[in-house]
Structure formats: structure tokens, C-alpha cells
Image: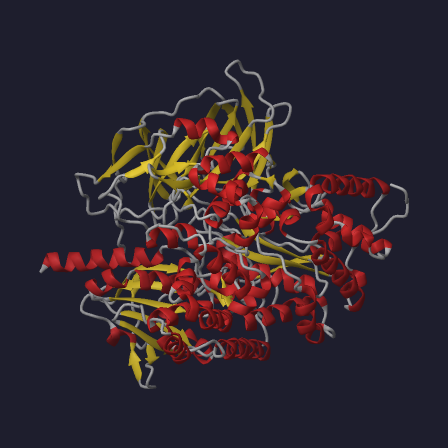
Amino acid sequence: MTSQTLVFSMDAQSLERIEQRFQEKLNFADTRKDKLFHVFQQPLTEEEAWALKYVYAYMPVNDLADYDGELFLSHVRRALDIRKRVPWGERVPDHLFLHFVLPYRINTENIEDFRGIIFDELADRTAKLSMADAILETNYWCHEKATYIGSDLRTISPLTMIRNARGRCGEESTLAVAALRSIGIPARQVYTPRWAHCDSNHAWVEAWADGQWYYIGACEPEAGLNQGWFSPPARRAMLINTRIFADYPGPEDITLSEKGYTEINLLENYAPAHTICVRVINEQGAPVPEASIRFELYNSAEFYPIAEIKTDAQGDASFKTGHGDLVIRAVSGGKWGEILFKAQDGDYVELVLDSSEQPSGIVDFDMVPPPEGEGEVAASLPEEKIRAHTRRLEEGTKIRSGYEDTFLSEEDAFALAHTTGLPPERVRDILQKARGNSREIAAFLEERSGEFGEWPLQLLESMNEKDLIDTFRLTLDDHLIGALSQRGQWAEETFVKYILCPRVSYEMVVPYRSVFQNAYSEEEAAAFREDPSMLAFNLEQSYLYYEDLPNLKGKGNPVGTYSLMKGDPQSLDILFVAVCRSLGIPARLHPSEQKPQYLSDKGWEDAVFSLTSSRNQESSSWGMLQLLKDSEDREDAPSASYAENFSLARLEDGVYKTLIYPYGHTDIYSDPFEVEPGAYRLTTGIRLKDGTVRVRFIYFIVRAGETTEVVLTYRETVVDIPVLGKLATGNELTRLDGSEVALKDLLGSEGAIAAWIEPEREPTKHLIRELCELAEPLDKLGVPIVLVIGDTEWNASFDSGAYPKLPVRTIFVRDSSYAALSGFISKPAAHEAGYPHLFVLDNQDQIRYSASGYKIGTGKEALQIAAAISQSLNGSE
């Protein structure tokens, strides 16, 4: 380093470390040097040069592969310029600016030049506000732009989120962090990897104002900071953390720090916590350094590692977590040890690495989550502020709805279908999914259908729904024309799924076919078609395996991976499939194993890469797993549903890796599963109302060429139907037509399911989704579903017609200020956004079940209780 001038308040040692990491990246990405590092030849201020070096020093491998230097220089210059223009710019310390304003990446999203676009929208709205009020105002803006909807695992970018006007919580929080950073406010995405008390997970945002970090629910504004519907469930979390793409010194607890990447543990800000100290020893009693310790909890029918920590030289490691149960597993050198850690067992664990084969038979145990805890009661707000907040929510919803009204309509779709001669319903379906990108998709169909018939439509239908929002004509043309030029003699179904379709895993879809078709001579391409294993060998000869950051594995696009020729094994797998499809070779990632395969005369064959060749060669002959129904056919046993109440995992390198099958897959007994030979664990679980899970492990072996039969069983449970209270008289509600009705008059002969809801919030959206998914059994049961909405929510552009898939006996009614709710619960948690409040009533007006707040699965619990009540009534007649 030639200059000793200190910038960003960093000492010489810190600057030296950045310079060293920058030089490492310069050498690492030598194949893309011209694309990435030419920006340093431009005139740069010292501040710009060091900020740009900082960005490169901590850049993930995929970003070095996928993007060009101009994008990163633009982010740097925008961030530095905005810092000078916002009123709080000088108040943000340099270390916070570097770690929580300057970074361009938030999650696993596609990187775009968003700062200037968002700043232009927010600058005037926030210029005269305090930092705290600017955070609130930014969240109102986010609410105008997007709302919650469940979706797949690929994280869309902030600009795509705005185009789509909706996304899952990880995408809402990515947008909110991007927006806050775009006005110079330090912000970070905070998440619990998995809940312990229910399935799924959640992400939200922390933002810094004048010396303090605050939290907000992204795109779900509250009238004040440190409020959100997720506050009560967060008090039951086992880990809440955030990722930082840098060497971050704290002051927060650091869970993981390696390769210029840091994860910090923020649990104590939300929930009671304690530190578990683990020592790992071998069978001789000696400490085992560098052993991997996995802290696993039950979620979505699997044991998910919320943290994975290495032991130090003395074999020790520690982990700060919540007061719930964990399975702790240590692995090193092909041996492992495991313990069920109960929250009351103290804070010290010693694990002996004494196992090299899995156990046999069945193991039953309970997993108990942290208990519910009382939070601080938020100070009551002035009525005027509450009214202003309500008005802002309504205005935001109307703004977003007005934008959604600009999407192409059903009439537009039918007109396009008429013009192009395409099937109207299929065109409508595609354009509805494309939402804010519908005009781009329509233009592609209009331009290409005349020449190519239905092929453009089939290309669009082969892609994931989310792809239709951020894929444009240039990319679509590349895949359409490039695929049809390699059509060959393949059956149409094979061609569409495994050649035409550009989607491989969860990478960004880019125009890659022309690149790969031009990369090889006709002779090479013909040889690869004759023997695709030669392509695998060809690619790997030039490929350097390099593990990317944990959450970015396999997220790089094929063109970037090809140009860099470095990355994790998953990225090479995706590259192989993309090149195969570009050359007219049907290829895929195996549906459950996610291994690269190509189709030959013999069927699907594995592409063998050296890093995993030993396992692949062993598994060249697959085994079959036949699941059998429990012969006892107990009434309390749930219907088997993959990733909901059971999962399959194979033992690999000392840990169980869950097989990937569609969530909620229920057709599991008719055909056997094709799986690799090996040791397996079948996990079944029944979650009780308090969040406790009755777990069962069933261990078995699958051998090559053989069919293994396993009976899928669950532990016995007793459905508890206590009487929790009685419906009070005089609960007056208002029907859609304005007439008044008592809740008692809406009950059926067998009772009812009633819920007080807030339709704009994520917890209610989860409940409504569950009720829609359960429409068939609820319709069969015949109980009315009464969904009660307060006047405030009703006025916020609520449309009862937006839920056509709800059970047929669903009734929407209004409850002024949620007054009738007091007849059900004595202490409403409204100050914590504790909705929805869900109840099951019997025909005696008795409350037999209640659940409040965010909890996945309450719809099924309510159905189970209502069905049990109905059965008892019918049995007594």
C-alpha cells in the first residue's frame, strides 16, 4: 500500500487488510479482469477508490462472475453522493456506512442499479424529517409499492418487487433495506432462519437512527418504531441474525466469521437467551478441533440447522440461543455424536464422536419450543396519530391497487389471444402471472407467435411464475430461437421440459443459449450430443471449485459461471444443465437429489464430476423406497404430507440431508420413490397447539437395485377439546349489505369457525391461504367460516371478492373497532398486532379452540377441532 492516508476512519491495518483482499479478488477473477476492474482506470477520488476496493474485497464469487464493474462503481458513487445530500449523512459513523449503507447486496437477489431510482422517489418525502420519522416514512412508501404473498425461494430484486407489487417477507425486507440505504440510513435484513413454535420463518428490517437500532415490519408500516405483528413470535425465537458481507468486528455477538463474511446474533434484542457451551471429544477423551457442530430444530418436518459452528483448538464452541429444545450434532472425520438438548438441562454439553453408522429401529421424543412471553406494552398513541396512520395505510393500499389496475386485464389477454391465434385461457393465465411485466410478455407473444406458433407460449409456461416478472424479450428471444434450432427428434414433452425451459434451479434466468452455442464448434457439439459425459469432463477440466457464501451457493447464472470458471459445485451443476439444453441435450437436476443428469437411450444418467464422483459412481444403480400406510389407521394420525408432517433424509458425511420433494406432496403410497442407496431417516411429526412436536425417527437402509418397504407411522396424540368460555350475548356485527346481525345467528347447527382478521397483514394472509387450501374438507364438514374485519381494515380498499377459493360457507362481516372480540379474549393483543384471532365454537355457543397471532397451521388445527366436535355430535345422535 503506497498511501498512509486514512479514509472512512479506518486505521492503516484495516486499509491493509482491504487492499490484501482486493488483490486476492483481482487475481481470483483474472478471467473477467477487463469486465470487472477496468473501472479503476477512470478518474476516482480517494474516497471512491477505497469504497470500490472495499466492495470488491468482500464480493461473493457469484457477483464476480455475474456482473460488470460499472454497476459497482455506480453503487459506490451514488452512495457517497447521497451521503452528502441527506441531512443525517454526517451523523452516520463511517463503520456503519461501510457495513450497512454502502453494500449493494442484501439477500440473494439479482443486483440492479436501484439507488438513484429509489432516492429520487424518497428524497423530498424524507428531507425534512428526523431519521426515525424517515424510517417510518420509507416504510409507508414500501407499503405503497408492495405487499405480502408467499412465493418460491428465488429472491427477486427491489426493482422487480416494485414491478410485481408483492412478494414474500424476504423480498419485502430486501426492498425496505434497499430503500433505506438509498437515502443513506443504515439498514439490515434480520431474520429467524426457522421458527421453533411453528413452521416457516420470517424476515424483517432493522434501521439505525441517531445512535440506536430499531426494527420495523417491511412493507407493513406501524405508527411507531419497534412494533410489528412478529413481536410475540420473535420472543419465542431460537436465533435471530443478520448477514454482513465484510469482516465485521461487532459490537453484537458474532455467530460466524470467515472469508470476509460475518453473521451476527441479535436474539437478545427480541427474546430471552442463554449460551450453550459444547465440548467435542473423541473416543479417547481428547478434544476435537475444527469439528462441525450443528444446532438443529424441528421445522417443516425436518431438523434444520439454524447454526453451524466449528470447534476451536480445545474442541469448544458456544452458541447463544433461546429457551427451547435443540438436537445438537457434532461431526468430524467421518464420525459423529448427537444429543437431544432440553432447555432445562443446563448450558454445558459434551459430545463424543463415537458413531459411524446410523442407529436402527424407531426413536420417539418431544421437541418443546420456548414458552410464550409477555412483551412490553406499547405506549398508547394519541387518537390523532392513530387516525393519521390509518389514513396512510388506506392511501398506500389505494396507490398500490391503482398501479395494479394498470396491468393487462383479462380483456386485453383475450384480445391478444385473438390477434395471435393462441388459446385465450392460457394467454390470460400467463399475463396474470406476469403482472407489472405483462406488457413485455404480451409484446413477446405478439412478435413471435406469428413465426413460431405456440412455442413462445410454451416457453413461458415452462418457466416459474416468478420468472415472468423479471424476464424480458431479449432473454426470451435467446431461449426461444436457440432452443428451436436444437429441436431434434425429441418428444414434445421432453423437449419443452428439458431443452426449451431455461430455468434450472434458483439462478437468475439470462440469455445463455447463444453464448454456449457459439462457445463450441459443430464437431464438439456433435460429440457432446453423442456422449454428454464428455461435456461434463470438458467443463470440469477448466473449473476451479471454490465454496461461495452459504446462502449464495448455486445462485450464479450459467453465463457468469462459464466466464469465471470458478465457483461452488452447485453452480457447475447448473452450468452443465444449461450448456446441455443449449446444445439440444435434454438435461435436468434430479427432482429430489438435485444432481445434474442428461437423458440417453438408457434413461436419465448422472453427470459425473470428480468432486462427487465416488458417491455418484456408487449410486449409478438406484434403489427404490416404498412407503406403506400404517395398518392401524388411527383416527388421530394426520394424512401424510411431505414437508408438512414427514420428510426423508439421507446420511451423508455424518449429517442428514433432506430430500427435496414438493411441499404438501400427498400421493406417496402408489409409486415407490427412486433414491440413492444409503442410510436414511424418515422423520414424522405432529405439532401440538403449544408448539411442542411429537417426533418420530424411523431409520432404514436402501440398497442398490432393491425395493425397501417402510411403514410411515406417527406417534399417538390426543385431541384436546376443552371448554375455554362461552360466547357472550349482544355481539352485534354488520353484514356486507349494511344490515346488523348477531354472531350467534351466524353459527351453524354444528358451531362455526370464526376469526378476527387484518387482511393486509402477513399472519392473516397465511390463515386465509390455509383456509383456501382446506376448502374441500371444510366444505364437506359444512361449518360456516365467519371472517370478521374491523371498520379500519374494511375501509382500506378491502375487496371480499378477492378470495374466490375460500370455503363456500365463508361469511365476511364487520366489527366496529373489533368490539365483539372482547367477548372471546379478555386481553386483546392489538397493541402488538396480534391478529388474526381464530376460534372454534360448538353448537352450545361454547369456545372450544382459540389461537392468536402468527402461527402456521392454525387452519388445520381449527379444522381438526371442528371435525372432532362434529363427530361427537353425530355419534351422540
Q: Is residue 557 visible?
A: no
Q: Farthest left residue? A: 877
Count up the numbered dots: 0
Which percent across, then down, holds residue 419? 40, 78
Q: Quarter of the image holding residue 281?
A: top right
Q: Is residue 178 left or right of residue 341?
A: right
Name the residue located 61 percent from the left edge and 47 percent from the top edge: 62
Q: Pick the residue in front: 231 or 510.
A: 510
Which percent across, then down, holds residue 127? 74, 73
Name the residue located 64 percent from the left edge and 71 percent from the top edge: 137
Q: Is residue 116 left or right of residue 832?
A: right
Q: Farthest front residue? A: 523
Q: Farthest top residue? A: 284
Q: Quarter of the image holding residue 387?
A: bottom right
Which percent across, then down, holds residue 782? 20, 66
Q: Is residue 107 above or below residue 452?
A: above
Q: Is residue 416 above or below residue 663?
A: below
State the scheme by which the image is colored: secondary structure
Q: Pick the residue in front: 630 or 557.
A: 557
- Quadrant location of the C terminus? bottom left
Q: Is residue 798 left or right of residue 176?
A: left
- Quadrant location of the N terminus? top right
Q: Pick the residue in front: 448 or 680.
A: 448
Q: Is residue 68 visible?
A: yes
Q: Quarter of the image holding residue 811?
A: bottom left
Q: Is residue 661 above or below residue 459?
A: above
Which percent across, then down, holds residue 96? 74, 53
